[in-house]
Each structure stands twice: as C-alpha cells, then as structure tokens.
Image (cartoon, rainbow, N blue to C red):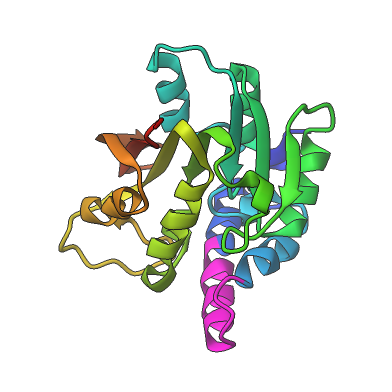
Amino acid sequence: MSERRQAPGSFEARRQQGRATAHTLQDAAEAKGDPLAWFDDLYKAAGDDPAAIPWAKLEPHPGLMEWVARSGHLHEGRAIDVGCGLGDNAEFLDEAGYDVTAFDLSRTAVEWARRRHQKSHVTYAQADLFALPGDWLGAFDLVHETYTLQALGADIRRAAMGHIASLAAPGGTVLAICRARGDDEAVDGPPWPLAQRELGAFTHAGLEQVSIERFTVTRDRAIAHFRATYRRPAG
C-alpha cells in the first residue's frame, strides 16, 4: 500500500493536521525550556503516518537531486545527512555513490527510517547536532542538510550552522537547502525561511562560499528556496 494511503482521510488533510500539531508541540517545548523536544514528540504523535510529518515528502528533495545531477564530479567518499527524518535524501545520496551516515535528533524518526529502508546501506544513527560524536568532526566529504535549519529558532540557528560546518573534512563540501525569505521579511514559523545574509554564518565557521542559488519548488504552490554550497579549505 502506498505510504500516502496508509491512514484514513486525504493525505493533504492529514498533512494540514500535522502542521497544526507541529506548531502546538513546538510552543509547548519552548514553554518548557527544551526547544528541540518537539521533534521526537511529533514523530511519536504521527503514529507511522508520514502525512503527519510536515516536511516528509517521501522522495528526495528536488534541489538535492538537481545538485547531484549537475555537480559534474564523482559522488564518492563519506557523506552525512543532517536531520535525516524518514531517510529519503540519505537513500538518494547512497544511490548516487556516497558512503552515507544519516542522523536525526529523534530516535523515533531514525527507527522509522530503518523500517522504511530495511535493505539500506545507509548507517542511521540517533544524535544531537549540538553534541556530535567526536569521530564525526571533520570526517565527511559531503555534509548535507535540507530543512533542518529552518526548523530551528533564530536564537540557536547560527550555532547549528557552526556544528554542521564542523562535520566537513578538509576540502569537503557543505550543502544546505532551505526555504528563502528577503533580508527584511518577517516570518512566523516553524518553518522559518532563511534570509541570505543568515547563511553567512557558514563562512564565520571557517568555510568558503562556493555558491548561493535561489530556486523555486512548486508542488501545490511556488515556494522560494536557497541552495547554498560551501567548502572547507583543504590546507
């Protein structure tokens, strides 16, 4: 049975309810002083229905697929997928040729990803971006994140970017994909689309900017995105 049809009610109606639940859980976590607790709470509340996870598209992100298709180099070496969720981006990177590690703060999400991809070569792990395993630091040729930063409040987002950057090996690439907003545009999240100037935190973390592209993802509506690529100096 298709994952979009495994629970009663239309997929989009369940997705809308998932968005409402995410906002409620995020507010409760903030009130308790644990702003990241809502991620695992949301995966638990979903009851194995992917429609209840607002960012779970059950396919690789088109911005990632386009980047891989046109990047013009061999996709090999070690890659890490930050905030892997249900694993679709991690599996795509594995198919592209990388040796992939994928992690999420939510243990429920990691277990769900393993169930979905039982024959996978991806190493799935539960881990906290703000307390990364020491042997991961500086260890990856590609560090990929999609939609993780935009799920974090502004007060911790800059620190998160520093931790993401810390995973890149010398000469390694950091690829970040997020919804975009204007520098002076107010937003109410989650998600919180990023302004281009916010992405400068990656350069403050020791990376060199390769490119920042603005592109549009169209599903039920057109949504502006950034695809930002950075590199850690080899020397």
Depth check: 57 or 221 in front? 57
Depth check: 70 or 202 in front? 202
As displayed, is residue 88 above or below residue 47? above
Most prominent secondary structure in the magenta stretch?
helix
x and y percentages locating residue 127 in the rendered image: 69, 56
The answer to which quarter of the image holds residue 187 is bottom left
Span colored in magenta: 19-36
- The structure residue drawn at horizontal position 59% and vertical position 75%, both measured from the top left corner, is 25
Q: Is residue 7 visible?
A: no
Which residue extends farthest front? 235
- The structure residue drawn at horizontal position 58% and vertical position 47%, both measured from the top left corner, is 137
Q: Which quarter of the rendered picture does the N terminus lie within?
A: top right
Q: Is residue 183 magenta?
A: no
Horizontal placement of 229 versus 15: left or right?
Answer: left
- The structure residue drawn at horizontal position 37% and vertical position 34%, both measured from the top left corner, is 233
Q: Is residue 45 visible?
A: yes
x and y percentages locating residue 61 in the rendered image: 49, 34
x and y percentages locating residue 145 in the rendered image: 49, 43
